[in-house]
Amino acid sequence: MVWSILAGRDRMELENGMDLRLLSALEVLQARREAGELAQEDRERALCSNACLLARALEKSEDHTPVFPDGRAVLAALTVEEIAALARKWSEFKRENDPELGLGEEELEKLKKNSEMTRTSG
C-alpha cells in the first residue's frame, strides 16, 4: 500500500531500521487466510494471525522491502513475546492513524481534495 486516502500516516519507523506500515483490506484478508492454513488448532490462531500480519506490515526502512516472506518465517524467527509486542505496537499505530468514520461533509471534502493532490503529485 503506497498511500492511504484517510489515514494520518501510513508507516511508523521502529528503532531497529524497520518500519511497521498500515495494511490494505486485501492484505488483511490474505493474512487471515494464511493464518487459517498455518493454525492447526483454534488456540494457535491468534499467534498465527499476528505472525502473518507482521509478515506484511514489517518492512526494512531503507527500501521498504518485507523483512519476512510469510507468517511461517515470522514464527520461525521471532519469539511469542516478540510477535505479541510487535502486533500490539502495530495495533496501536493503526488505531492512532485510522480515520474516524463520523466525518462531517466539510471534512470529507477536504480529504477528497487532499487525496487527489497526493495521487497526482506523488
Image (cartoon, rainbow, N blue to C red):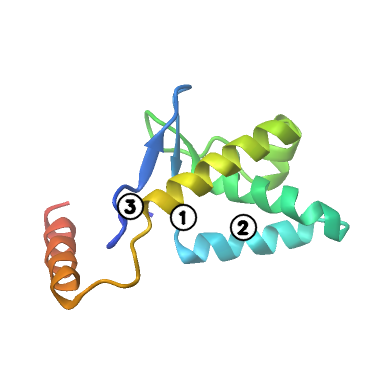
Q: Is residue 73 left or right of residue 54?
A: right
- The residue carrying pointer 1 sits among few (fewer than 14), some (14 to 19) or many (20 or more) residues within 10 Å by Cα, namely many
Q: Is residue 95 above or below residue 112?
A: above
Three-letter amino acid code at the position of disc 1: Leu
* Foreground pick, 97 / 37: 97
Task: Tell me if residue 39 comes above or below residue 113 in the rendering.
Answer: above
Q: In this image, 22 relative to 118: left or right?
A: right
The location of residue 80, given as percent across then percent down, is 74, 35
Q: Is residue 4 above or below residue 79?
A: below
Kindly identify the amino acid type of the residue bearing the numbered disc 3: Val
Q: Residue at x 17, y 77 (%)?
A: 105
Q: Is residue 83 above or below residue 37?
A: above
Q: Read off the residue under disc 1.
A: 23
Q: Tell me, yes or no, if residue 28 can be seen here.
A: yes
Looking at the rendered structure, the kind of residue marked 2 is Ala
Alpha carbon separation for disc pair 2 and 3: 18 Å
Q: Quadrant of the N terminus?
A: bottom left
Closest to the observer: 2 or 85?
A: 85
Residue 28, how many percent across, how many down? 55, 61
Q: Earlier in the sequence, mark 1 or mark 2?
A: 1
Q: Element at badge 3?
A: loop
In the picture as drawn, the residue positioned furthest to the right comes out as 41
Q: Residues within 10 Å of mark 3 (few under 14, many from 20)?
A: few
**Identity of the residue drawn at 44% across and 29% down:** 14
Circle 1 or circle 3, nearest the eye: 1
Image coordinates for residue 32, horizontal then vertical, percent: 65, 62
For disc 2, the marked residue is 31
Q: Which mark is residue 2?
A: 3
Q: Are marks 1 and 2 in contact (CB under 8 Å)?
A: yes
